[in-house]
Every structure is written in structure tokens, then in C-alpha cells.
Image: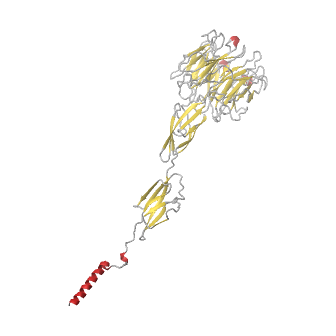
Amino acid sequence: MKKLFRIVFCIIIFAGLFSCKNPLGSSKDDDKPPKNDDKSITSFTFPTSTSTTISESNLTIAVTVPYETNINNLAPSISHTGKSVSPASGVAQDFSVSKPYTVTAEDGSAQTYSVTVGVDPNPSKRITAFNLSAPHAVGIINESNHSIQITVPYGTPIKRLAPSITYLGSSVSPASNVIQDFSSPVTYTVTAADATTQTYMVSVKHSTYSDFNGDGYSDVIVGDPYYLYGYSQGRAYIYFGGSAMDSVADVIMTGVSNDDNFGMSVSSGDFNGDGYCDAIIGAPGNDSGGNSAGRAYIFWGGESMDNLPDVYFTGSNSLDYLGDKVASIGDVNGDGFCDIAISSPNADSGQGRVDIFYGSSTMDNSEDLVIYGEEPNDYFGQVLSGLGDVNADGFSDIIISSVCHSEYRGRVYIYNGGVSMNNIPDSIITGSTINANLGRSISTAGDVNNDGYIDIIIGAWPDIDARAYIYYGGLAINNTPNLTLIGDSDLLGRSVSTAGDINDDGYFDLVVGPSDSDGGSYDGGSARIYLSGSIIDDVPDVIIYGSIPYGSMGFSVALAGDVNSDGYDDVIIGAPANGVNSLGKAYILFGSSTVDDIPDVVLTGESEYQAFGLCVF
């Protein structure tokens, strides 16, 4: 019995031990842990990717790469929790369309992600060009401080400019070709496609007026058409401006023959576009094209300007008197070059004509446009001038008079510039009475009322009460004057001109020459300066009197530019009969905040009984 009990006990113990090694009677293979079923992508990047968004809910991956990345050949770096991923990490793919990526888990299960690659918006926000087409001007862009400087010809109204803008970005504000007031700097903002912005500060300035040698100072020309006494070859003198301007001529040009009357008219502008102002001088008595057919000469400016003419214009017929008047007329056709007008007032039996020559880098002497007078003995072109842009269309305009028209009533013609300028006047102003002599002198007035349009001043010598009329510029010129300056028998209006902004208050001022006034001496003449402002009146603010009887102070007046570069415009006044034995003089009056009547530089003719100062510019 004991033996049987022992046997049963051993069987029970053995069975217990066996059950501990194989619980529940499981097989040997079930002893291994189960395989992992993880199959997630945890990271999906490119060397230049900017962001990655992984969505487990819809199994998508969105990756963004920088602008201009080539997404046709990208090799992603992939991290995942599965056994493998296909396509594999580091293998280049074309992501121009969405790409499936499949992750297989350890247990053989799999899930697929749809991968899309997007490109960041263009971050560019840069102005690449900032130009004006009329007047032609190219902006200088400084990316270091995000500023733009654009230089326009002297006298250009800057309150109504419409720049053409080229830029990188989605938009620019203000928009291209929208009129802006540049009397103070204007901020332009470029917005990129990614919504970031960049601002530019745009400033407009005027070029130096009549700067022949490029030193930044305005220069002046004085004509003496009757030099040398008894021979009248004529001369023209150029005086360079400077911080301490002197009275010694820097360049002297002389007529080639007796009775040429070289220097009867003078003007300047940059006709060949090299950055230096050039001189044009008329010699109406020259005989190269016939007896007094006339001639005009261009002298190129430069760092070392000489007195040798570079371009000739010659009259076609005897007694045409080509060159009696010459004028720099600005850029009338919008090609970026200053243009020229030359009159032949005696051509075609005194009907008169004016030839227009467009400037260019290879300027020639073939006229580009001819404007004819209306009737014989009108002497059309006896007076002419460039105006600037009176109608603010971006093209310079010109003004020409026929003083003798209709029994000396006088008539003035305004021609608007344009890409295809024609010879049909756009505005006509006629003297109201016989012997009104309207147009005896004409000039741009500058923008005297600061409305963004260039204004006009016209002198007239009726039988009594000589006068000068101011007409405001605009889209259309009204032939009724906006202001009348009245003299007496002093020949007020013999010469008229803009004085520039002589007191730097933002308004252009006027200078008028009553050459026979008696304030300083009998018929000594004078020059009167009228300061403009929000209100302009007919009372002169400054009068400079001639001290010599019959000296003809104010016979010619002109803007001198800023000859001493102090920020104020200056004026030059001719007195061709002034001085001992009528040497002739020209006076430069510096501008200032308080303009006085004391000339600052006095220029004197070379010899007796000449006409030094008959014309000035």
C-alpha cells in the first residue's frame, strides 16, 4: 500500500512540474513574442524643406520647399516605425505629382501615405527699373538703402509725374504709370507673393541748369553780336559758375567773318545726351549760304570745352537771317535728348520760318520739322523760346511769335510737343489792338502758381503802357491772361524770363526788363523781380536800376541757374549800352531767402561801342 502511495505521489509531482513549463499545454512555437505591427512615417524631409505636415488620420504628408526648388528630382530622408518603406529613403523621385509611400510593418501589414510637395511663394520684392518716358529719365536704384533717385531736366514740373515701374513681386503701390506728386519723396511698397513687403523711398531732383563743364555749377553765356566795332564779327562768352564765380570768360567763341553778327542769340542744352550742356549760337549775318542767309553753330560741352564748332546749320537763301533767334526747347519728342529751334524770320518774303532739329548722340543738321509763318512780313520767329511742359503731358512745348502780324497787333503761337510733333499750333494768342506788339518778348515763366503746370510770360509794347502778361499752363491754354504787369513808357516787357525759384520758396519767380526806365538814371533801364507765391501780384519785389544814362539795363534778362550752387536760383541781366563808351555789361544777381538789388558778379565787354549783353542765357 505504501508502495502504491509513493508511485501516485511521484506521478502528481511530475505532472505539476510539467504544467509549469508548458502552461495550459501550449506549443513550443507559442513561446516567442508577437511581431510588431507599427507602420508609421515619423519624419519626411528634404535638405532644403521649410515645413512638413504628417496627418495620420488621412495618411497624407505635405512638404514645402523653398521657391525655385526643382521638385522633379528630390531625394527625401524618411524615418518610420515599420520594417521597410517603399520607395526607400534617399532615393530621388519626381514630386511634380503626389507620390505614394508604403510602410510595411514587422508583422507584414502595411499602410500607404500620399506625399505632396509644394513650393514656397516667390519671396522677391524688388524694384528693378523706375523710369520716366516723358520727360525721359532713368532712376538710379540703391538696394543697400532701398532708395531711388531720378533726375529730370531743370524746370520740369514734378508734381504730376507718372513713372513706369518694373518689379519682382505680386504688386507695387502706388502702381506703375500712376501720376504722383514728387515735390517731396514718395514711398513705394513692393509686396511679394509670400505677402512680405519692401519699401523704397523715391526722390526726384532737377539737373543742373546750363552746366557746360559738368562741375555741378550753372554757367552763363553772353552775346556781343557787334564785336569788333566796325566789323561786327560778333562774339559769345561763356563764364563757368563756381563757389566764388569771377568775371573772366572761360571760353570765347568768335564769328568767322565780318558782319556775321555771331552772338545775336545764344542758348544751351544737352543736345547729344553726353551729360554736358552744349552751346548754340546764332550768326544771322553769315554769308555761307548766300548774302546774310545766316548760320548757327553748336559747341559741345565737356570737361575741357573748346571754342571750335561741332555742328553747323546754314540758311538756304540770301537774307533769310537764319540764327536770328536760337533756342534750346527741351525734349519735344520724348526721345531723351534736348532739341533745338532756329528761326529765319526774313525767309519767304518775311513770312518767316522756324526749323526744329531733334537732338541725338549723332546729331546732324537736317531739320526734323519746319514751322512756317502765316503771312508775308509777319517775320515769324523773330522771337522764340522753349517753354517746358505747359500741359503736363510729359513733352516739352515751344512758343513762337510774329510781332508784326496784322498791323503789329502781334501773334503768339504755342506748339505742344509729342512723339509725332506737328507744325500746327495748339494755342494762338493775338494782340487786341493795332501796334500792341504782342510777343515782343516771350519765355517760360516756370510754375509760378505751383499747380504742376509750366506757365508763360509774354511781353508787349503798345503805344502806351508797355506790359507783360502771364498765362497759367494747363491741359488747355486760355488766351486770357491770368495776370498783367503794366509799365509806362519804360518799355517794360522788352525782355521777360523766369527767374527760377530765386528765394527757394517752392514757387518760380519772374524777371522783367523795362530797359528804358529812369529809376537809376535817364533811360538807364532796370530789371524787376516779381516773387511768386500762393498769391502773385503785379508789384515788383526787387528792382535793380541801371546807373548809366541810356545804358539799357534789362535789355535782356534770363535765368542763370544756380551759378554758385548755394541752393538758390540766380538771374543774369544784360545792359548792352552800359559802361564807359558803351562797353556793355551783364550782371548776375544771386538768389537768397531775402533777394536784394545789388549785383554779385559784373561781366564787362571787351571794347567800345559794342553790344555786350545784348543777349544772355
Nearer-the-camera pick, 397 or 155: 155
Left or right, 279 with reference to 99: right
Quarter of the figure that contains the N terminus? bottom left
Left or right, 156 with reference to 272: left
**Res. 386 image quadrant:** top right
The residue that appears at 30% across and 81% down in the rendered structure is 18
Q: In the rendered image of this protein, does residue 102 appear above or below residue 236?
A: below
Nearer-the-camera pick, 567 or 382: 567
Image coords of residue 189 (percent x, y): 50, 40
Please identify the residue farthest to the left as the structure is shown: 1
Can residue 504 be seen in the rendering of this structure?
yes
Left or right, 151 with reference to 253: left
Image coords of residue 252 (percent x, y): 71, 23
Q: In the rendered image of this protein, does residue 411 appear above or below residue 420?
A: above
Can residue 22 be seen in the rendering of this structure?
no
Quarter of the figure that contains the C terminus? top right
**Res. 595 image quadrant:** top right
What colouring style does the render use? secondary structure
**Res. 110 image quadrant:** bottom left
The residue that appears at 25% across and 83% down in the rendered structure is 12
Image coords of residue 602 (percent x, y): 64, 17
Nearer-the-camera pick, 15 or 3: 3
Label count reads 0
Left or right, 295 with reference to 417: right
Image coords of residue 115 (percent x, y): 47, 60
